[in-house]
Image (cartoon, rainbow, N blue to C red):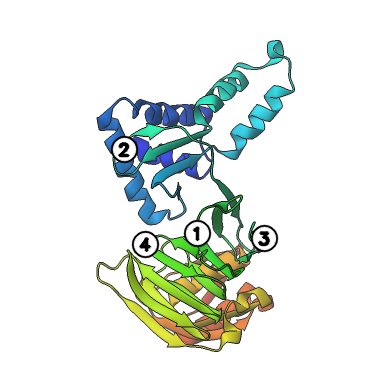
Amino acid sequence: MKDKIKYLFLQYYHNRSSRKELEDFFHIINSAKYDQEISDLVKLVYDELKQTEPSLTYIDDAGNLVLKEPDWIKEEQAKAMVKPMRKRYPYVIAASVLLLLSVSVLFFRESGNISWNNPALVKQFTERSEHKYVMLSDSTQVWLNASTTIEFPEKFTGKKREIWLNGEAFFDVKHADKLPFIIHTGKVVTTVLGTAFNIKAYPGQQNIVVSVKRGKVSVLKEHQLVATLIIGQEVKVSENAPAFKKIEKALNSNDVGNWQQGYLSYDDEPLQEVINDLQRVYNVDITLKRGDLKNTVITTAFTRDIGPKRALEILSNLTDTKLKIENDQYTLN
């Protein structure tokens, strides 16, 4: 049962659910309102998934967990509303009925009780090799790097501004006295009032990296202060290490978020993470055959427009490996 809930949860989150899977998912969620055992199981699965999917949900000021309906349900509902009832296909009717149940799901993290509420977040994302600019309701500007997801309220209310990030983004935060701007990236939370900074937090990445271009930033992990950064400072925080671990260093503030200008720079980065970055940037598949080199640290820089072949030739020279290209598949041996 636990594995099924986890599977359905991920299908739902990534908008991959079939109609049957979506129906099963919300049947389980709805059953949890009346069955404490199922409710506890749903909460357990959520807590586990949150470790690898930091933007899975939105926690509101009351400590409630909000899930949102997949976009395709809205599309089906919109189509259904313009058709006469007698011409609707059964699956459209089912989707419309399901919509009444699945507008959103909210349960209390502490008690596991479930109730219904309206969706709270807007979701923006980029594919491989794609960049995107987003303006938030408070005039904060956000630039999303490739393969990045960001979730935020359509309009900020209350005493804080909160967003959820999975990937890499550069922020230029609109200053607002007494209204902190908070970015959640798994166990690591970054808080500012008004500043410009970059956060890199891709799934599977060894460290979450926060770099400051302007202003002041505080970085916490599980409610413990990791660092307070000012202009030209950077911190790397290990999210998954059981012990508190951080690496601080100084850098040129002009280099913060320079991927927006087409620069790819790596300073003592594990080879595998550099390769993962190039796969996102160029939308290509790269295989590192030498497993013993995955954690070899690399320091290099080049412009994005040199292309994947030249970028990998540079890595090949630095690591004494051979580059093989076959059917658009790149391999380092």
Frontmost of labels 1 and 2 is 1
Q: Secondary structure at mark 3?
A: strand
Quarter that holds the C terminus? bottom left
Q: Position of residue 273 (x, y in %)?
A: 46, 72
Frontmost of labels 1 and 4 is 1
Q: Which mark is residue 187?
A: 4
Separation (CA) of disc 1 from disc 4? 18 Å
Mark 4 is on which residue type?
Lys
Q: Which mark is residue 135?
A: 3
Q: Is residue 331 visible?
A: no
Viewer-side residue, 159 vs 124 = 159
Frontmost of labels 4 and 2 is 2
Q: Is residue 12 above or below residue 211?
A: above
Separation (CA) of disc 1 from disc 3? 17 Å
Frontmost of labels 3 and 4 is 3
Q: Earlier in the sequence, mark 3 or mark 2?
A: 2
Q: Earlier in the sequence, mark 1 or mark 3?
A: 3
- At a point 39% along the width and 55% down the height, the residue shown is 52
Q: Earlier in the sequence, mark 4 or mark 2?
A: 2
Q: Which mark is residue 112?
A: 2
The reply to whether dot 1 and dot 2 touch (C-beta < 8 Å) is: no
Residue density around tag 3, few if under 14, some if 14–19, many if 20 or more, within 10 Å: few
